[in-house]
């Protein structure tokens, strides 16, 4: 089936130009002015609208078993909600329990994801270490298209990676041509502060940010970046929430180190006053890690996106309903950590970023799609409008608007932390691999349509070194 998107303005991370796009099957097959519609093609009138690569969300947790419950959106409802918001691909996380096989966990998550309505891929978390983990990482890169491994420096006793694990795993990533990613918060410090606050009788959601002050992220971000520097590994820091962590990233990038940073719309919009809400549900609904921060951090994060020291925006979509949040009614450390946002991310970034003049449209495409594709090595198959790219396209109506409400959202969560926000700039059409699944407010997602995205490894460190050494053999100098 072919689709002709006619009369729009094409916007990628590098250019803006008028033109038509012709899709056939999964792919874009032609781009240019005044393209002819093949017979039987359906035509989308994109006049007055922007035609952009579909959004890529590099950080989601569909149906994640976590803190004694399971995130409410499964791979179908979560990716379907994404399509309604202009997001056409996700990179989710395989999180093996410590002591269990990474490969088995990978196959378990692959099974869960088969119902996805849009394309998906996986980062795999390294939550413990022994020779089998070392081997499984090799198998995952070689045979299963995994090129990124996640390390939680928080969640002590659950999935926290100690420095010993970070060092061993980062080294393995270098060997394999994979990129380590980190959730940068000092889990030992958090554990200590949580106990201290509870002992002081602070049991409500207001205890959450107090147990995870900015220093907790700053210390861990700096530590992970320095470990990567010492070993010579690139590193990607997820959900950067503080200016201190951004400073660590900025310093390292200024030094030429391959450090990447991700931020979430929530950390760009909310501040820590949300936890002081006397309505328990309202406050607990915002409990995620790292928490929303004192106001001045938002300005720093926007500057991070504008300066290019932060490259991607994600949602960390990990949705828990009010009754799940209530598990922590008497103890904030038991409130399942996580918030939703996959349907709202693109419109939030357009409304708060482009319409305010903080971001150009090209930067919008970069931070919502292209940069994630480049960093995770799936560009230009994804994140790009080019002949041969997957026909993952969002037709964006800058004049359209929507008011966010739990009553109209597609996610299964029973509240929305962005409730009542009116966002200008919305998708009018979302195409996933050449099929229209969202059209003028109507979602027609299809369970199981999504395909697994294989992500090839980067040239391994040793390949890079050999390239530098050229014909000279890489061996130690023998000195008498
Ligand atoms: O830390 C994460 O990224 C997962 C466990 C989701 N929850 C959260 O609060 N961010
Ligand atoms: Zn995290
Ligand atoms: Zn996460």
Image (tube, grey):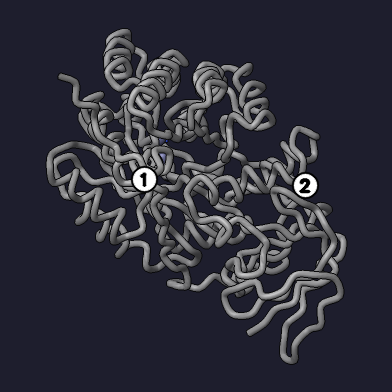
**Residue ID at (37%, 24%):** 224
Residue 107 vertical placement versus 198 (above, below): below
Residue 386 location, x and y as percent? Answer: 67, 64
Out of 233 and 237, give the one closest to the viewer.
Answer: 233
Neighbourhood count class around disc 2 (C-alpha, 10 Å): few under 14, some 14–19, many 20 upward: some
Quarter of the figure with the C terminus: top left
Q: Is residue 277 visible?
A: no
Is 186 placed left or right of 60 in the picture? left
Q: Tell me the CA gap for discs 1 and 2.
A: 47 Å
Residue 463 is tagged as 1
Q: Do labels 1 and 2 touch, CB within 8 Å?
A: no
Is 426 placed left or right of 225 in the picture? right
**Residue ID at (23%, 29%):** 476
Neighbourhood count class around disc 1 (C-alpha, 10 Å): few under 14, some 14–19, many 20 upward: few
Disc 2 secondary structure class: strand
Is 235 placed left or right of 369 in the picture? left
| Residue designated by label 2 | 424
Extreme residue toward the front, this view: 480
Out of 126 and 440, give the one closest to the viewer.
Answer: 126
| Number of numbered tags placed on the structure image | 2
Out of 261 and 63, give the one closest to the viewer.
Answer: 261
Choose top left, top right, bottom left or bottom right for residue 395. bottom right
Residue 73 location, x and y as percent? Answer: 43, 54
Quarter of the figure with the N terminus: bottom right
Choose top left, top right, bottom left or bottom right for residue 390. bottom right
Foreground mark, 1 or 2, reads 1
Disc 1 secondary structure class: helix
Residue 401 vertical placement versus 358 (above, below): below
Residue 187 location, x and y as percent? Answer: 30, 22
Q: Is residue 457 visible?
A: yes
**Residue ID at (55%, 52%):** 56
């Amino acid at each position: 089936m072919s689709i002709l998107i006619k009369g729009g303005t094409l916007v990628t991370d590098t250019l803006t130009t008028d033109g038509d796009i012709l899709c056939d099957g999964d792919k874009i097959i032609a781009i240019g002015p005044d393209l002819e519609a093949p017979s039987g093609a359906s035509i989308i009138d994109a006049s007055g609208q922007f035609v952009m690569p579909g959004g890529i969300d590099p950080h989601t947790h569909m149906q994640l078993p976590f803190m004694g419950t399971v995130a409410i959106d499964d791979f179908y409802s979560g990716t379907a909600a994404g399509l309604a918001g202009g997001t056409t691909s996700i990179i989710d996380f395989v999180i093996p329990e410590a002591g269990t096989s990474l490969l088995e966990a990978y196959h378990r998550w692959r099974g869960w994801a088969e119902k996805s309505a849009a394309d998906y891929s996986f980062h795999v978390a390294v939550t413990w270490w022994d020779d089998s983990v070392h081997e499984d990482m090799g198998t995952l890169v070689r045979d299963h298209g995994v090129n990124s491994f996640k390390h939680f420096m928080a969640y002590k006793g659950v999935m926290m990676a100690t420095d010993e694990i970070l060092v061993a795993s980062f080294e393995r990533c270098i060997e394999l041509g994979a990129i380590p990613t980190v959730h940068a918060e000092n889990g030992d410090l958090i554990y200590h502060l949580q106990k201290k606050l509870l002992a002081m009788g602070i049991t409500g959601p207001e205890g959450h940010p107090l147990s995870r002050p900015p220093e907790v992220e700053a210390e861990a971000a700096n530590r992970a970046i320095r470990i990567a520097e010492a070993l010579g590994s690139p590193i990607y820091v997820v959900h950067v929430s503080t200016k201190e962590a951004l400073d660590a990233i900025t310093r390292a990038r200024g030094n030429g180190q391959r450090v990447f940073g991700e931020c979430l719309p929530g950390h760009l919009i909310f501040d820590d006053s949300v936890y002081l809400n006397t309505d328990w549900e309202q406050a607990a609904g915002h409990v995620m890690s790292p928490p929303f921060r004192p106001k001045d951090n938002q300005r720093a994060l926007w500057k991070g996106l504008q300066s290019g020291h932060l490259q991607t925006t994600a949602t960390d979509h990990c949705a828990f309903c009010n009754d799940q949040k209530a598990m922590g009614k008497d103890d904030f450390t038991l409130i399942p950590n996580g918030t939703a946002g996959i349907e709202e991310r693109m419109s939030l970034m357009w409304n708060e970023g482009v319409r305010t003049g903080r971001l150009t449209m090209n930067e919008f495409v970069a931070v919502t799609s292209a940069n994630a594709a480049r960093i995770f090595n799936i560009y230009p198959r994804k994140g790009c409008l080019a002949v041969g790219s997957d026909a993952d396209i969002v037709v964006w109506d800058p004049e359209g608007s929507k008011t966010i409400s739990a009553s109209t959202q597609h996610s299964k969560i029973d509240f929305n932390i962005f409730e009542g926000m009116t966002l200008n700039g919305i998708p009018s059409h979302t195409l996933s691999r050449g099929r229209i699944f969202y059209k003028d407010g109507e979602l027609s997602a299809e369970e199981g349509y999504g395909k697994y995205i294989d992500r090839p490894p980067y040239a391994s460190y040793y390949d890079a070194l050999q390239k530098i050494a050229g014909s000279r053999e890489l061996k130690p100098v023998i000195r008498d």
